[in-house]
Image (cartoon, rainbow, N blue to C red):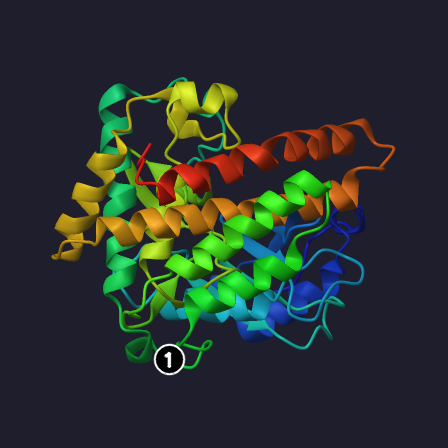
Amino acid sequence: MRSALSPQSSAEAGLDGAALAGWLREHVGDAAGELVGLEVAAAGRSNVTVILRTADGRRTVLRMPPAGDHLPTAHDVAREGRIMAAVGTTEVPVPHVLGIEETGSVLGRPFFVMDHVEGQVFDALEDVSELPADQRRMLGDDLARVLARLHRVDPADIGLGELSRTDGFIERQLRRFTRQWRPIDPALDSRFAAMGDLLTERRPSDEPPARLVHGDYRIGNVLALDGRVAAVLDWELTTLGDPLSDLAYMLNNWVDAEEASDGPITSAIAAGGFGTRDDVLRAYEEALGAPVDRARVDYLRALAAWRLASIRSGVVARLGDDPDPQRQAKAAASLRSLPLLIDIAERLLDGDQT
């Protein structure tokens, strides 16, 4: 198998096409096909996603870190590839991983290659405009069922029992995002700190068996086809911990039109027709085969909102003085969301499940 890839398409993707073709030939073999084209599907500060086209019309997908310096633990695509390969042995739908290059010696950065999966990402309201009502509801239920399937998996059974620490999940979240908060103004800083203290005071005393926690499970991180989840994407934040934290995070992203219009979280779910949060909980419980502790879910929803405020304070600090108008707009939106996220955390701790 030789490469018919043009130097121009390689340069546009920022890759050494000949080196990539050689690695594919050696480590993936005929499953990779003859590489003839590249298309960057996603780039920026997140991991880079490149569609690889072959002479016979097939497509595969390459994932690698963004160019430039970043923290050693950030953008660990080799780890992400190993997680996906392991999860691929379960009933959770993920793209099949064809090969992982961990050294960075081929393209200057580690990467992995996986099968291309047909489907659509619903990340914004306009993405849902042509999705039929019956498929919306089917997809809403399937999102919950797939998450429950993930949480039924014992990490040790698929070789991920040593992926991360399994104890003190909530305590570690509280410590990490307390440190990560970037000062905004005294009043908001004080509110954030007080909420962190309250979350610490009210954290559950028990600790369930650690399960795989996707870390960013929402409708915008799956490929959907015909009202079903065709593949779960973006496993870079996966860890071991309280599985209900995934459910809580998804519920926070399960916003209706009113919440999205004036709230801190936007989601394609706000287009309507996907079911309610109660529907999500019922579908999850049915697939899990056990009831969930609703009070614990509310606590974890509050923790997730507070955590998101911490993350967005970093966005404000990083982009607030950026001359680019789009980045300034992102910083402004993040700043506006901070008190709203703390409001959500307060209401959830007070027993308001909205």
- The quarter of the displayed image where residue 354 is located: top left
Label 1 Cα crowd, 10 Å radius (few <14 / some 14-19 / many 20+): some
In the picture of the structure, the residue carrying the numbered disc 1 is: 161
- Disc 1 marks a residue whose amino acid type is Gly
The x, y position of residue 45, in whole percent, is: 70, 49
Residue under the point 23% across and 48% down: 294
Q: Where is residue 280 in the image (x, y as percent from the top left)?
A: 24, 39
Residue 58 rendering spot, x and y as whole percentages: 49, 48
Residue 198 higher or lower than 166, as above or below? above
Q: Name the foreground residue: 339 vs 237.
A: 339
The image shows residue 55 at horizontal and vertical percentages of: 57, 49
Residue 116 left/right relative to 180: left
User: Which residue is pictured at 46% across the width and 53% down the height?
Assistant: 198
With respect to residue 22, does 349 lie above or below?
above
Callout 1: helix, strand or loop? Answer: loop
Residue 67, by quadrant, is bottom right
Q: Which residue is drawn at 33% across and 71% down?
A: 210
Left or right relative to 272: residue 60 = right
Can residue 81 be seen here? The reply is yes
From the viewer's side, name the closer residue of 122 and 163: 163
Q: Quadrant of the N terminus?
A: bottom right
